[in-house]
Amino acid sequence: MRFDTKLAVVLRDDLAVWQKLNVTAFLVSGIAATVPDVVGPAYEDASGQQYLPMFVQPVLVFSANAEQLRVAFERACVSDTACAIFSEELFATGYDEANRAAVQAIATNNLNLVGMAFRTDRKAADKIVKGLSLHP
């Protein structure tokens, strides 16, 4: 099935594996919580056991160095694409209120981004991730 939108995550390539997984989980939660119809109904197996719902479309995960991530972020901002961000400072916090304070303390141009996620139409998404490779 072809979707009119893309759901993408861009991760800085120098993160430890645990950081990449943690950042991805946090970032996509923002999309799941705010984008209508991006999550489908609950799953159920043949025995009737129910499971939590998931996204209705694939999540594309891209890898970028710090400069490439900054460019992708700026492209998202210019195109008014809503995105979730994760800055390096969030690795030192342990709860939501501290996360919000850490982001709020830094101006947009000075955010030390390690990841971002967004869902937008295919053309806009392709422009945002232009030049990036899918995460290996």
Image (cartoon, helix red, strand yellow):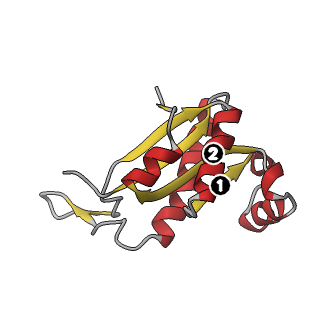
Q: Residue furthest left?
A: 46
Residue 136: x percent and y percent?
46, 25
Q: Say which quarter of the image contains residue 126.
A: top left
Residue 101 falls in image quadrant: bottom right
- Tell me which numbered mark, 1 or 2, is placed earlier along the sequence: 1
Q: Is residue 30 left or right of residue 35?
A: right
Along the viewing direction, whichever of 24 and 69 lies nearer the viewer: 69
**What element does badge 2 sit on?**
strand
The answer for how far apart the CA atoms under marks 1 and 2 are is: 6 Å
x then y, percent, for residue 57: 31, 54
- The amino acid type, in three-letter code, at marker 1 is Ile
Please state the horizontal and vertical placement of residue 51, each as a whole percent of the image: 30, 61
Q: Nearer the viewer, residue 57 or 5?
A: 5
Residue type, mark 2 in image? Gly
Q: Tags 1 and 2 in contact by the CB under 8 Å rule?
A: yes
Look at 63% across and 45% down and name the residue there: 115
Which disc is residue 69 wearing? none
Picture layout, residue 49 above or below residue 68: below
Residue holding disc 1: 85
Q: Is residue 114 above or below residue 122?
A: above
In this image, 6 relative to 48: left or right? right
Which residue is at a point 58% across and 64% down the rendered structure image?
Answer: 80
Residue 115: image tag = 2
31 vs 17, nearest the viewer: 31
Residue at 62% across / 29% down in the picture?
13
What is the x, y in percent for residue 75? 60, 50
Task: State the residue at coordinates (55%, 63%).
Answer: 30
How many dots with numbers? Answer: 2
In the depicted structure, whether residue 64 falls above or below residue 100 = above
Residue 95 lies in what quarter of the image?
Answer: bottom right
